[in-house]
Amino acid sequence: MSLSLVQRASRFLSRRMHRRLLPLRAPVGVVSFTFDDAPMTACIAGAALLEKLGVRGTYYIAGGLTDRMEEGMACHSESVLRALLAAGHQLGAHSHSHVHVDRLSAAARRDEFSRSSGFLSRLGLDPGSLDFAYPFGGVNLGAKRDAGRSYRSSRATGGGTHVGFADLNALKTHRLYLSEPDGVPFADRLGVAASQKGWLVVNTHDVQESPGPVGCTPSGLSSAVRQALDSGCVVLPVGGALDYFSRF
C-alpha cells in the first residue's frame, strides 16, 4: 500500500524529531544480530549457530505469533523462547499482533505495547527495560514518540551503521536478507563499524537453506558473524550493546 503525502511527511520528520541520542565512545566497534518475529528456524538453527561461535542475539517477539504460522513458516513457542533466555539470548518486543504501529491511533498503539509487555513479563522479563523493533520497519512521528516513552530502545529497519551516536528511538540496521539484499555490502558497513568504533545492528528473520525473502541461510549468517568477530568488533545483543556503550 502506497503512503499518503501526510504519512511520508511524518516518516521524514521522525528522522529528526523525538530523538534520544546515545554517544558511541567505546574503544572498539559493536555488532548486534537481531531476528524479527522469531521464526522457529531462527530460534533453533540461528541460535545454535550463534552459540557455536560464542555470541548471542536479540529476538524481537510478537506474542500474537506464538505457536502460529507467519508467511508459511512456523513461529516460536513459549518453550523455545524460554530456552533462548536460558541460553543467554535477549528477547525484545515487536508489538503483540505484529501490526504497523505507525498506522494505529495512539490509544491502539498503547494497547499493543501493553499487551506485548504483558506477554514478555510472563516469561520473566522486566517491562521497564525492554527493547523494541517496529514491525515492518514502520516509523512515524507518533510511533516514535510513543515507543520512546515505552521502551529502552526502538529499532527501525535499514539505514546502515551508527557512527558517533545512535538514536535510541530509531536504531538503524543492515538488512541481512537473501532475496532482498540491502544494497550496501555487509563488509562495507562492518568496516565502518570497526574503523570508526561504531555500532552495526543486523536484522533478518528466518534462518534456513531456502529462506524467505527477508531471511538468510545458515552459511550467510555464519559468515557475517565470523566477519564481525574477525574485524575486532565485539558481538553483543542489543541490550548488551546499550550497557556496553553506557560504560564510556
Image (cartoon, rainbow, N blue to C red):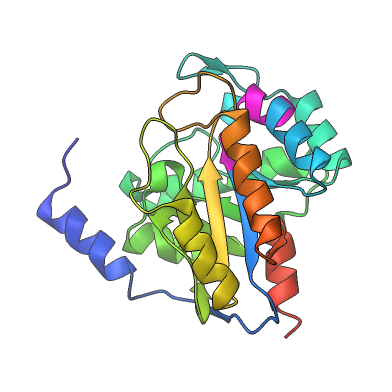
**Which residues are drawn in magenta?**
35-44
Quarter-of-image position of residue 74: top right
Residue 147 in view, yes or no: no
When the figure is inspected, residue 215 is found, relative to residue 146, above or below; the finding is: above
What residue appears at the point 50 percent right and 76 percent down from the top-left corner? 163
- For the image, the number of numbered tags is 0
Q: Is the N terminus in the top left, top right, bottom left or bottom right quadrant? A: top left
Q: Position of residue 57 (x, y in %)?
A: 70, 47
Q: Position of residue 150 (x, y in %)?
A: 57, 61
Residue 72 as seen in the image, left or right of residue 59: left
What residue appears at the point 42 percent right and 62 percent down from the top-left corner? 144
Q: Position of residue 9 (x, y in %)?
A: 18, 62
Residue 53 as seen in the image, left or right of residue 70: right
Quarter-of-image position of residue 11: bottom left
Give yes or no for residue 42 being in the magenta stretch: yes
Residue 42 in view, yes or no: yes
When the figure is inspected, residue 58 is found, relative to residue 180, above or below; the finding is: below
Q: Position of residue 244 (x, y in %)?
A: 74, 72
**62 and 59: which is toward the camera:** 59
Give yes or no for residue 204 being in the magenta stretch: no
Q: Is the C terminus in the top left, top right, bottom left or bottom right quadrant? A: bottom right
What residue appears at the point 77 percent right and 45 percent down from the top-left corner? 89
Residue placed farthest to the right in the image? Answer: 86
